Amino acid sequence: MLSQRWLCLVILTICAGSCCVRRADAWSWFEAKLEGDSPSFVYQVPDAADIAVLRPKGQRQQNCTNGLNSTAPSLTEREQLSKALAQRQCQYANLQHLKEENDWKNDLVLFMIPTGFRRALPRVVLSWLRNYVACMAVYFGVSGAWAYYVYWVFGYCLYGPGNMPSTSDVFEQAWVAVGSIPGYAVLPALTEAVVEAGWTRAYARIGNVGVWWHLANFAVYMLCVEFAVYWMHRLLHDIRVGYRWLHYIHHKYNKEGSLSPFAGLAFHPLDGIIQALPYCVLLLVLPMHFLTHELMLFMTGIWTTNIHDCLHARIVPIMGAGYHTIHHTTYQHNYGHYFIYMDRFFNTLEDPDEFSSKQKAL
Ligand SMILES: [Zn+2]
Ligand SMILES: [Zn+2]
């Protein structure tokens, strides 16, 4: 575990160090991108052979055995084939756009790696590296900025005496997160490979479905995510083995004075993956804009920073830090993700104000 963390730090240091060297290359690429000279992957456009494949199996055999004109399609069949062909071309175009977009993200985030070397790496490795670098940047950027403001700048008026975490707690949480982020990055990398293989219902352009369908897709997707994340989290508590071997690492910090924004990603790597799994698995069954999916996944990293600062903002129905602090102290309430609805529906909601009144009454 220790060597894994050092390896991660070394990779990040190399990447950060290379930034200065490769900066010029990155900008020239970005300018080329703006001019439309972007690298692209070209799929084979379906030809006559594809048309033959597109024919239903029974019809193909029938055409081969009728002895007359076995290859010429009838008028009705021609219409069906052209529809199927158009559909297939849309799928090709969608996958091509997804690949181009992923290349663009690789070039944007990994610009410090020489282009030739970058192109030679397997796509899944590039994707993992990009997600790893981005996750580290988001984690330290957001948690660092958050901690600076809530503790150092406004800490004197936001926290009572003894309610701020100790430096050793903060460092320990950051250390756990640094060891787990390489594991977290595996999930989006594998998801991207599955998406590029065309096994999901992810689409590259909002224009593919239209704005209203996109918004409807987004709403259904996030509703399902809320449901699934709630149950993943709850099961990690209810199944003893899951709690003891995976989720306990995060719940080690169970006092108000020990939680900090850096606890946001302090999970066992498998625990983090399990809780993020709904975001990825749902792509197999629900249509969803891929970039929005990725942004929402990274948004989780930002969100989780917010809910570990122990500051109750009273913004109903958002599942803020007030609710999540109770989750850390009672273990059986407030399992939800962004909203409190799932906890209310499944009767596990504990309101921070009511909870504090009960505590005072004791
Ligand atoms: Zn928990
Ligand atoms: Zn937590």
Image (cartoon, rainbow, N blue to C red):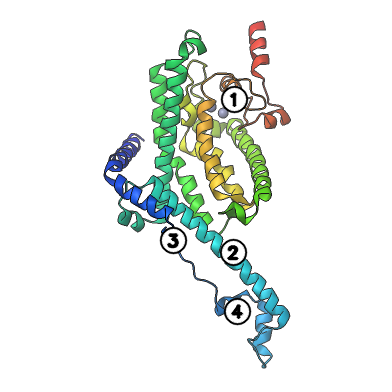
Disc 2 element: helix
Residue 320 is tagged as: 1
Query: Is residue 99 positioned above or below 170 on the image?
Result: below
C-alpha distance separating marks 1 and 2 = 42 Å
Q: Residues within 10 Å of mark 2 (few under 14, many from 20)?
A: few
Residue plotted at (59% across, 64% down): 90
Where is mark 4, residue-wise?
52
C-alpha distance separating marks 3 and 1 = 42 Å
Residue 40 is tagged as: 3
| Tag 4: amino acid | Ala
| Tag 2: amino acid | Cys
C-alpha distance separating marks 4 and 2 = 18 Å
Tag nearer the camera, 1 or 2: 2
Disc 4 element: helix
Q: In which image quadrant can residue 339 be found?
A: top right
> Which residue ends up furthest to the bottom in the rendered image?
68
Tag nearer the camera, 3 or 4: 3
Foreground pick, 313 / 63: 313
Where is mark 2, residue-wise?
90
Q: Residues within 10 Å of mark 3 (few under 14, many from 20)?
A: few
Disc 3 element: loop
Residue plotted at (66% across, 38% down): 227
x and y percentages locating residue 279 in the rendered image: 57, 43
